[in-house]
Amino acid sequence: MSLFPALPPTYYHAHFSEMLAFVRDVYASVLGEAEHNFIADFTGLSLEAQCLFIRMSNRKRPVFTIADLVYAEIGEIEWRLEELAEAGFARRACAEDYRSWLDTLTRPVLEQMARDHDIALSRQWSKAQVARAVEATLPFDDFAAGFSQTTWVPGHRETVGFLLYLYFGKLSDNLTAFTLRDLGVVSVRGQTAYQARFVSREEALGGHAYTQALRSLKGATPEDYQRLAERAGTLPSPATPFVEGLRDRLMHDLGRFFERQKDTDQAIGFYAQSGLFESQERTIRLLHGRGETERVLGLLESMLDAPAHDEAFLFADDFYRRKFGKKRTSAFTDLLRDGEEISADDLYRGLPELAAIRHYEARGWTAHHVENGLWPALFGLLFWEDLFEQPGSLASEFDWMPQALKDNRFATLFPHVVTERLGALETGRGWPLIADTLARHEGRENGVFGWWPGLSDLMHDFLSAAPPKGVRDIVAALCNDFQGLRDGFPDLLLIGHGGVRFVEVKGEGDQVRRHQLARLNRLRQAGFEAGILRVAFRPDPDQVYTVVDIETTGGQAAYERVTEIGAVKIRNGEIIDTWQSLINPERRIPPFITELTGISNAMVRDAPRFADIADDFEAFLKGTVFVAHNVNFDYGFLSAEYRRLERPFRYPKLCTVSSMRRHFPGLAAYGLAPLSREFGIELTNHHRALSDAMAAAELLKLVNEKRLSALTAF
């Protein structure tokens, strides 16, 4: 039985008609003669001809035979094709379609065609090379004569592509998004009115042209780059900042290509046509490499006088001082050297943020892993009504990012609201506004930030402890440049008696990226304490471990539940605490599980549910390494239980199975019972949680004797 609703046979026709009606209404001022004529002529076709055209347009094939167009809901295909041809919606393939037609054929078909016409091929050739050889040698008429059926090409490809671009704001080959919506696979944000995403026809055409050019560079060959470079001058002049941004990206990509080709003059020429900071940086580095000092100094001074953003200033200032001020190290290096460094057990390798959280919690801070969640969430909650509830705040039901954030227009569109809300933040009155939004909209999907458990409490605590002017300054920056500042913020937020701190955490080998450095500097300028913490990993003899064993109703964490937990806490090889509880799984325990574990339905009937013991067990685990025999089984089940409660579960792990294999190779078996017999470990009640956890704890001692032996050798 299908989990999805059944769609009618001509569902795609309904989708196409919905798209046309939307574009006709919302983009009336953007549509030109070609689009208006297309819509009028399309509505004059018979229903079956319309369906056939949509079917052909929704497929990526450039050419079709009759055999390619067999659809149960469309009869008399030949007649429908003729109707489409009469109305200009299809035509028979001709010489200009030769190459695209060849591309639809399989390599074996192409090779057979070459053999039939004595075309020499190489076994090392790609399919594209074989197609080029056929095209160069075999005349089109001779090629087409080899097909028994007439081949057809759908018309208005460019017009349909442009209409879809208007609707979706990106290049789209089909209307799959509508189908996924109707099937309930993707959610949409329905509104009563929508706003055109393009302010003029010039902006829409320019956006379409540059977006097509950028797409053409994905997987492009050097020849493709050269061809695009030759016609780059024919692309439309940018009419708006949106199109300028696309133009800048394209010119930067072309510049990077020529730089890779060692054609410095061409690279600098294309970089000069891009307004991206990255293009300025590449130009300066290339010119400096060529010894053009005066030009470099002029560009650096221009960037310092009017930097596009924080990263541009930091680069220009750093490069200027290092290359012309005899400064030996960069700002990146200085910041790393000034940062704090801690050591964590090597089991935290890959989890540096968690190691940092444990470090700060031990020193009395409340640590939150916020990264790029805190500031966008604060911005979104503060301006929710203006971002999401204004008529026409979105461009279509498939959009989630508010139109007001396009090209950083938010502060310009809502100047009075911005002034009022920033004033509330600066005077410490921000929390009531946030609380009101949370009460009315908590959990609603949006394109600005994601929800997470505890967000409300975090916002309250942060706004209570943070310097109001500092909060105001960062939110003001987001109002002016949300797209540029929405990421790169530090990993951790610390809240304590000393106020708040922001910390960017770096493990061994991690680099601080320029935008992360820029966010740290911006936070410092706003009055926050912000810096870098470097985490080094090495075995820690004082690390505390919790050895866990669970019993369950079955083997799959996604469907089964925990029936018992046993846990043993160890430090320096000594058991310092234990924890044990039966758990009511809220479902029946199968007889074979009862036979294996001895845990019956009667035993767990009055036991606490997992939700009842979740806090207590988490407190027992806090700050420790999670250890189990076949650790991913136990860890996976407990993660699933906490996930059902919408709570995170993240700990460093150690597996006594894999660790025993590593440190004690060559044993006959590595199950808990065989290992217990091998090493004389007591296992009196196998398959009960605490008994198994106690036995695994003894294995952990053996593992740590080996694992930590390197530390005691010196």
Image (tube, rainbow, N blue to C red):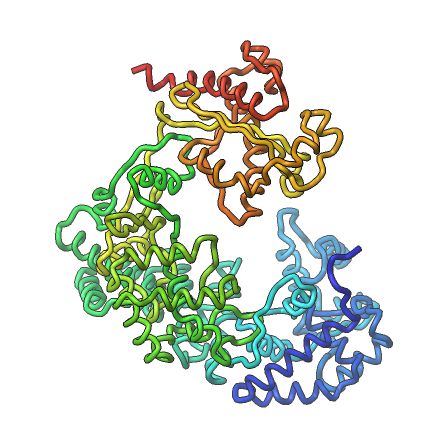
Instruction: Indicate whether 80 appears above or below 344.
Output: below
Q: Position of residue 634 (x, y in %)?
A: 57, 33
- Please give left or right for residue 612 compared with residue 542 in the image: right
Q: Position of residue 272 (x, y in %)?
A: 32, 69
Instruction: Indicate whether 702 appears above or below 633.
Output: above
The furthest residue to the right: 76
Q: How many marks?
A: 0
State the residue at coordinates (34%, 46%). Answer: 366
Question: Does residue 388 appear anywhere in the picture?
Answer: yes
- Please give left or right for residue 612 compared with residue 330 in the image: right
Q: Quadrant of residue 170?
A: bottom right
Q: Quadrant of the N terminus?
A: bottom right
Question: Which residue is at the front of the view, 218 or 37?
Answer: 37
State the residue at coordinates (36%, 41%). Answer: 357
- Please give left or right for residue 218 compared with residue 471 in the image: right
Question: Does residue 205 appear anywhere in the picture?
Answer: no
The furthest residue to the front: 606
State the residue at coordinates (35%, 42%). Answer: 510
Instruction: Indicate whether 564 appears above or below 519.
Output: above
Q: Quadrant of residue 419?
A: bottom left
Q: Position of residue 529 (x, y in %)?
A: 24, 52
State the residue at coordinates (70%, 54%). Answer: 107
Q: Quadrant of residue 158?
A: bottom right
Question: Which residue is at the front of the view, 278 or 151?
Answer: 278
Q: Quadrant of the C terminus?
A: top left
Instruction: Indicate whether 568 appears above or below 248.
Output: above
Question: Which residue is at the front of the view, 376 or 289?
Answer: 376
Q: Position of residue 515 (x, y in %)?
A: 32, 56
